[in-house]
């Protein structure tokens, strides 16, 4: 970003889209009727770099595609650009896809570590098939049978992943992510608690993450990979991020039953701080996540920065309650503001 003599702000913006499809331009709220053409295009044609100059600190813009003489606007809300900041992350639009994501069939992956097969279902964000230049953050969510479809879920109440994602995208509150729902089985309590969670987490790291890297377009950056779960699923998620900080950037732990069959609070208080973030929450009545939250504070985690703990009065311990409060952790992990902040932190660390 530079500031001109006219007190205008000037910055660049990168937009990525498959080159063979058409010509990329952008339109902005400076003049929604005027095409802004790129100042440069990459050698493979997939990345267009635009230069924008404006007096405002924020402008709204939309990527557009000129194809066969027609102008196509990107699906979704306007993008917001902060002119006084140079965000290195590109934008990945899509023009011909539905605004909803899609679900894969159930996938089975053999686990030599667990001596059984993992059953998975994958949620792919909208535009995944269309814009093949895009790579996404990924969330491994436990109890995958409870995430997507009421006919599969316990008590026929699912987490409504797709519905909540779509609403938050419409508000520009989150960026797209891939969700891998890892189904639990009759060994759930054994695999989600100590010592069984040691083999379970190792299976995720050594068997599922390599498959993710092979078959899914993820960023393959630990800060963009997280473990999610509720109740005991939150316990194994916390353990996984704590044990493998080089693989996971954080864990989302909803109503997690810490200290039932684990030593995680003791480990937080006695072991070195990890470079991972944690979202914890508690329902009603007072659940045991407050002790873990205070342990994290005591060990150097900064509330509101790399750790959050929220309490939801009268929220009971079930899928319906977790679905109703799914939006805060989604914004903590995949929120547009949160990801911009993490990107700036990475740039600052690189410059240092």
Image (spheres, rainbow, N blue to C red):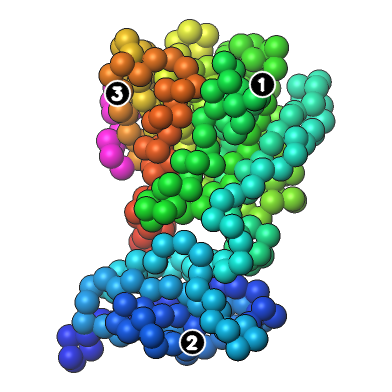
Query: What crowding class fits label 1: few (fewer than 14 Cα within 10 Å), some (14-19), or many (20 or more)?
Result: some
The answer to which image quadrant residue 189 occupies is top right
Q: What stretch is highlighted in magenta?
A: 294-305
Question: Residue at left 74%, top 29%?
Answer: 119
The reply to whether residue 191 is in sight is yes
Question: Compared to 271, does 287 lie above or below?
Answer: above
* Position in image of residue 79 (x %, y %): 39, 66
Q: Say which quadrant the N terminus sits in.
A: bottom left
Query: What crowding class fits label 3: few (fewer than 14 Cα within 10 Å), some (14-19), or many (20 or more)?
Result: some
- The residue indicated by pointer 2 is 38
Question: Residue at left 57%, top 16%?
Answer: 155
Contact check, label 2 and label 1, Cβ < 8 Å: no
* Position in image of residue 45 (x %, y %): 63, 82
SS of the residue at dot 3? Answer: strand
Q: Nearer the viewer, residue 66 or 350?
A: 66
Tell me the distance, in whole angstroms, between the alpha carbons under discs 2 and 3: 47 Å
* Position in image of residue 313 (x %, y %): 28, 19
Residue 101's mark?
A: none
The answer to which image quadrant residue 346 occupies is bottom left
- The residue indicated by pointer 3 is 311
């Amino acid at each position: 970003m530079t500031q001109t003599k006219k007190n205008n702000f000037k910055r660049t913006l990168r937009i990525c889209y498959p080159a063979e499809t058409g010509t990329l331009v952008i339109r902005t709220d400076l003049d929604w009727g005027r095409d802004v053409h790129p100042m440069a295009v990459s050698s493979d044609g997939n990345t267009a770099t635009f230069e924008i100059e404006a007096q405002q600190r924020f402008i709204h813009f939309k990527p557009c595609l000129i194809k066969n003489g027609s102008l196509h606007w990107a699906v979704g809300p306007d993008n917001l650009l902060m002119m006084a900041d140079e965000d290195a992350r590109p934008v990945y639009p899509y023009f011909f896809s539905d605004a909803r994501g899609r679900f894969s069939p159930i996938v089975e992956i053999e686990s030599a570590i667990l001596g059984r097969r993992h059953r998975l279902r994958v949620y792919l964000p909208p535009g995944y098939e269309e814009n093949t230049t895009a790579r996404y953050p990924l969330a491994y969510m436990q109890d995958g049978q409870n995430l997507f479809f009421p006919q599969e879920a316990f008590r026929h109440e699912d987490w409504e992943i797709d519905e909540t994602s779509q609403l938050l995208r419409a508000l520009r509150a989150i960026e797209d992510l891939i969700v891998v729902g890892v189904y639990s089985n009759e060994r759930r309590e054994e695999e989600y608690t100590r010592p069984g969670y040691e083999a379970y987490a190792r299976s995720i790291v050594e068997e599922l993450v390599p498959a993710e890297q092979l078959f899914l377009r993820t960023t393959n950056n630990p800060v963009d990979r997280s473990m999610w779960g509720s109740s005991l699923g939150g316990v194994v998620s916390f353990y996984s991020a704590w044990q493998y900080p080089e693989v996971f950037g954080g864990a989302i732990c909803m109503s997690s039953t810490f200290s039932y069959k684990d030593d995680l609070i003791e480990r937080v208080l006695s072991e070195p701080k990890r470079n991972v973030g944690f979202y914890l929450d508690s329902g009603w009545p007072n659940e045991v996540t407050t002790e873990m939250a205070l342990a994290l504070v005591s060990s150097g985690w900064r509330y509101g920065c790399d750790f959050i703990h929220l309490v939801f009065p009268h929220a009971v311990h079930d899928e319906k309650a977790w679905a109703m409060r799914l939006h805060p952790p989604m914004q903590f992990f995949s929120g547009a503001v949160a990801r911009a902040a993490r990107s700036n932190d990475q740039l600052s660390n690189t410059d240092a």
